[in-house]
Amino acid sequence: ERDKYENNEKAGVVTGLAWTSVGGDILFIESILSKGKGMLSITGNLGKVMKESAQIALEYIKANADELKIDPKMFENYNIHIHVPEGATPKDGPSAGITMLTSLVSTLTQRKVKANLAMTGEITLRGKVLPVGGIKEKILAAKRANIKEIILSEQNLKDINDIKESYLKGLTFHYVKEMKEVIDLALLKQKVKNAKDLTVK
Amino acid sequence: ERDKYENNEKAGVVTGLAWTSVGGDILFIESILSKGKGMLSITGNLGKVMKESAQIALEYIKANADELKIDPKMFENYNIHIHVPEGATPKDGPSAGITMLTSLVSTLTQRKVKANLAMTGEITLRGKVLPVGGIKEKILAAKRANIKEIILSEQNLKDINDIKESYLKGLTFHYVKEMKEVIDLALLKQKVKNAKDLTVK
Amino acid sequence: ERDKYENNEKAGVVTGLAWTSVGGDILFIESILSKGKGMLSITGNLGKVMKESAQIALEYIKANADELKIDPKMFENYNIHIHVPEGATPKDGPSAGITMLTSLVSTLTQRKVKANLAMTGEITLRGKVLPVGGIKEKILAAKRANIKEIILSEQNLKDINDIKESYLKGLTFHYVKEMKEVIDLALLKQKVKNAKDLTVK
Amino acid sequence: ERDKYENNEKAGVVTGLAWTSVGGDILFIESILSKGKGMLSITGNLGKVMKESAQIALEYIKANADELKIDPKMFENYNIHIHVPEGATPKDGPSAGITMLTSLVSTLTQRKVKANLAMTGEITLRGKVLPVGGIKEKILAAKRANIKEIILSEQNLKDINDIKESYLKGLTFHYVKEMKEVIDLALLKQKVKNAKDLTVK
Amino acid sequence: ERDKYENNEKAGVVTGLAWTSVGGDILFIESILSKGKGMLSITGNLGKVMKESAQIALEYIKANADELKIDPKMFENYNIHIHVPEGATPKDGPSAGITMLTSLVSTLTQRKVKANLAMTGEITLRGKVLPVGGIKEKILAAKRANIKEIILSEQNLKDINDIKESYLKGLTFHYVKEMKEVIDLALLKQKVKNAKDLTVK
Amino acid sequence: ERDKYENNEKAGVVTGLAWTSVGGDILFIESILSKGKGMLSITGNLGKVMKESAQIALEYIKANADELKIDPKMFENYNIHIHVPEGATPKDGPSAGITMLTSLVSTLTQRKVKANLAMTGEITLRGKVLPVGGIKEKILAAKRANIKEIILSEQNLKDINDIKESYLKGLTFHYVKEMKEVIDLALLKQKVKNAKDLTVK
Ligand SMILES: [Ca+2]
Ligand SMILES: [Ca+2]
Ligand SMILES: [Ca+2]
Ligand SMILES: [Ca+2]
Ligand SMILES: [Ca+2]
Ligand SMILES: [Ca+2]
Ligand SMILES: [Ca+2]
Ligand SMILES: [Ca+2]
Ligand SMILES: [Ca+2]
Ligand SMILES: [Ca+2]
Ligand SMILES: [Ca+2]
Ligand SMILES: [Ca+2]
């Protein structure tokens, strides 16, 4: 059965859009930190390409820590765990890339994720957001799940233009070129309530 | 053949509900600590998703050690081993998540598990308990095994409502949203008899 | 061809009962220590579940070292190797669990194993011995091999009751609930002749 | 769908030529550094041979660091991540070798990559560039993608001679024997704008 | 084609007997030491069981270093490599066990191997030599290869008794129970010419 | 297409003879060193047996460093990478053994490889060169590639004798028994031009 958007107050929980054999759905990317030496672990019955997305997201963040206002010492003092719930469902593909990136940045900065927002898009090391497939099914699932805003690659604009106007009602689309735009759109300046103090002394 | 509830006085032994090709059954999740450097090992002829549940449970506990009143130093001084008996039976799926979480918290705190209680539910990093399948078969197995109370995701309420009233007689259901509710329901304040002194000096 | 009981004077050699496609047989579980840092290695053409039994046995011993009178420092100063001879025969299943446990305790304490004794049973982390299959074939093999006493889970009592009385003549059965009973029954107080001095200084 | 050349100002982004079951295409090799101990990680849904190309490129650079004006201390102080976007497409073969080599040298020196340039060729440890297949399809894709200059092994000259003149219009070809020629042709003396200071103190 | 016995003056080269799909043959087990930290590496296109034999042989030697007059410090200061030539032929099974054991002891002590000797037999941790299959084919191969003496498990005596007397002419058989008998029979007191000085200072 | 001999001035590049499904060919074995802790990495789309050859060659060199005039400290201060070009072609088998050995010794000593020389033969730990298959096809390929001298196992003499005289014209054969003969034949006393200073201080 299909998921609904959760007005989640927690850092690191970001809503993505998935396209499965039974149609579109939303999914949640979750991430947390624990004390450690910078290991990345990934769960959720994910295929190789989706695991690579998590790895790419983390490498990108490490290489651009300054711009993202993340203390590089965090990567030597915390382990990072990324999970994509509903373990019974195998998941794969690169389209959760920007969702994973946003989840990691939120966890590392404790910045709050914008409400009623979902996203789908592949990430690259050069910072560009690439288009993904299954846009129509994903949009329908987003509406059903009470999503109000969606972030997409600008190269997916043509896919939106192919969708019947009435289906798009009530949805605002943000077309992005760069991964930094995603972070700016998705994460509030404001920290989550009860933000963890992750400062490395 | 089917198992019976054991009035177990040991920390770390928690009763889960399983759904196999030959119907429902109860299963026991066991965990113990040994001196070490924080390695997690998992046995019991488990598939990938069930092993991931153990990993998620441990990461969640590490990230929420304060709230769970667990000294984070424990994770650097003990190895943790999780086992699910009946090695001849392959087991998989995410539904033992809350049972594994409860087992680990009991082992790490030496808190006693409530008697005649069983549970089934998927865990997430954001602390939410997700619904699982096979509820009817699991409930019948629980009754047969002398279980009195069952913890489930509130999203499994509809599955209970589909079951004939008479089958539910003698069972109390606890519908939960959050993983912390599971811990509060399942673990007594009281420690087990002969609780181990796991304090890290 | 079938093996015969060996009146073995060595620590760590324990007789188990196996059930293969060509009927029952006895098998020997062997273990030895070498200087090292606590690695466990396992050989003998074993399947995943049988390897897990060795891992469970060792974790159980580590967690209960005090009760078993084993100096926990041993686990940081010795490697442990478990072997099950007849490498040409693939072996699997959980039924060698108590045999492996007994072998490890004998090796770690240098206590002598009782003569003409064999055993079969699955182990758990909570210390309970679980029943196993193929009891009839195993009993016949034990007699043929000159075994006099057999340790079984009390839940295998019904399987013994199904066997024709005459087959059981000359055999003494010990039905156990707990793994500690196995150790008490199988290992003598007395050390083996030429016991190794494994004390960690 | 097919990619277009991007006038990319970033270090480490180099355009290669690929030949897939649906014809030729350009692809981007991306690489970045993060603080670490010299680990190489590789993503992009790559097969064994393409991963080996990345490894060979890095080993060649390490062994020839002096000639390439790269401080060997960098390899002990940074991890290197290579990614080939479009994770949904499996990729393999040795032909991205020179592209990977150029990407790594650009990242390690922060030298700018020449504009509107693409390349294809296998690398060796002895520094020789080997010819690759699918040249015709790759050339057509390069034109479509707005590429102006192409680097190839001199042993691929005969493949270019087989292509109809009109298809080659607007393209300049550089036939190389040695990997050092590739670096000299592809990387400007000039550093990228906002070049990172990667000096190891 | 079939091998001939080599009157080898090198430590660590021991002749075994193999039984393949094309009949019997002799094979050579080779081992050498290099400075290191006790790693065991194994080559020769070997299957799992034959690799386990090498591991068992080494563990046995480590646990019985005193009796074998081997300084246990050697295992922390040298790596050991075992190779079985003719890489084009896959090899498996436990029957090279005593040959591997003898090779390792010869390498570690630099004791010379007896001339014109071959052997076949499975090893155990308790020191017992187990019988193996293909005896007839192995014996014929040994004769052809100019072998004069053969070491076998005493449980293979019946297999020799089944072979036509004339085939056995010119061969001396040594039937052993214990692995120590193998070492005593196969290794001379005398060291090889140009024995390496492996003393750990 | 087939390769030609390259009059290569670089250390570590040695010409081997390969026998593939499309006939014989020459191949190049390349090796280089980079600062490190003695890791061996191997690329070139090689199968298990060919990778084992590289491992055997290195172990042999380590164990015989004195005779080969190689400072054993090199193995703790450099990583070694072996590559066999033409990644698109899967390669396997033991016949590149002597070529790998020669490549490694050349790299470690910076000795020049004799011009117009190729070789094929399996290596062993005891230093003996074993015969290999496909000799006729390999010889034809060597001629075509402008090879003048060929090193072979003396046990391949009979294969050469089976080849029509006229095919052998212009080729000199060196039949060897021992791996040391290969080194003496293949490597000049003279170092390569611009030999690297690999001395470990
Ligand atoms: Ca869902
Ligand atoms: Ca997504
Ligand atoms: Ca059961
Ligand atoms: Ca459960
Ligand atoms: Ca047997
Ligand atoms: Ca048993
Ligand atoms: Ca593309
Ligand atoms: Ca390319
Ligand atoms: Ca042979
Ligand atoms: Ca043998
Ligand atoms: Ca070729
Ligand atoms: Ca060769």
Image (cartoon, coloured by chain):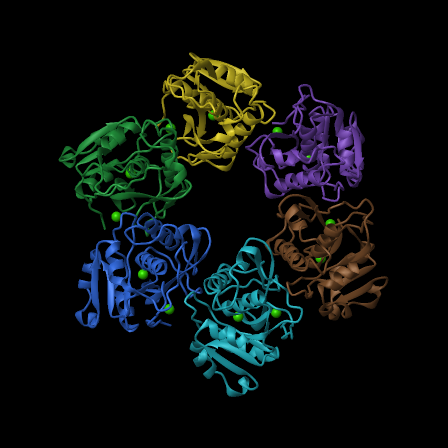
Chain colours: A yellow, B green, C blue, D purple, E cyan, F brown
- Identify which residue is drawn at 54% across, 16% down: A181
Q: Position of residue D16 (x, y in %)?
A: 68, 32
- Identify which residue is drawn at 35% across, 56% down: C93
- Identify which residue is drawn at 36% across, 22% down: A4
Q: Position of residue C151 (x, y in %)?
A: 24, 62
Q: Position of residue C138 (x, y in %)?
A: 28, 65
Tell me if residue A195 comes above or below residue B164 in the rendering: above
Q: Which corner quadrant of the image does residue D151 belong to?
A: top right
Say whether residue A118 is left or right of residue C149: right
Q: Is residue A123 visible?
A: no
Front-most of D24 and C168?
A: C168
Say whether residue B134 is left or right of residue A93: left
Q: Position of residue E136 (x, y in %)?
A: 51, 78
Tell me if residue D118 comes above or below residue C48 in the rendering: above
Q: Quadrant of ligand 6?
A: bottom left
Front-most of D146 and C141?
A: C141
Q: Is residue E112 visible?
A: yes
Tell me if residue C9 comes above or below residue C38 in the rendering: below
Q: Which corner quadrant of the image does residue C89 belong to?
A: bottom left
Say whether residue C147 is left or right of residue F8: left
Q: Quadrant of the C terminus of chain F?
A: top right
Say whether residue D58 is left or right of residue C128: right
User: How many labels, in total?
Assistant: 0
- Identify which residue is drawn at 60% across, 60% down: E33
Q: Residue furthest right?
A: F170
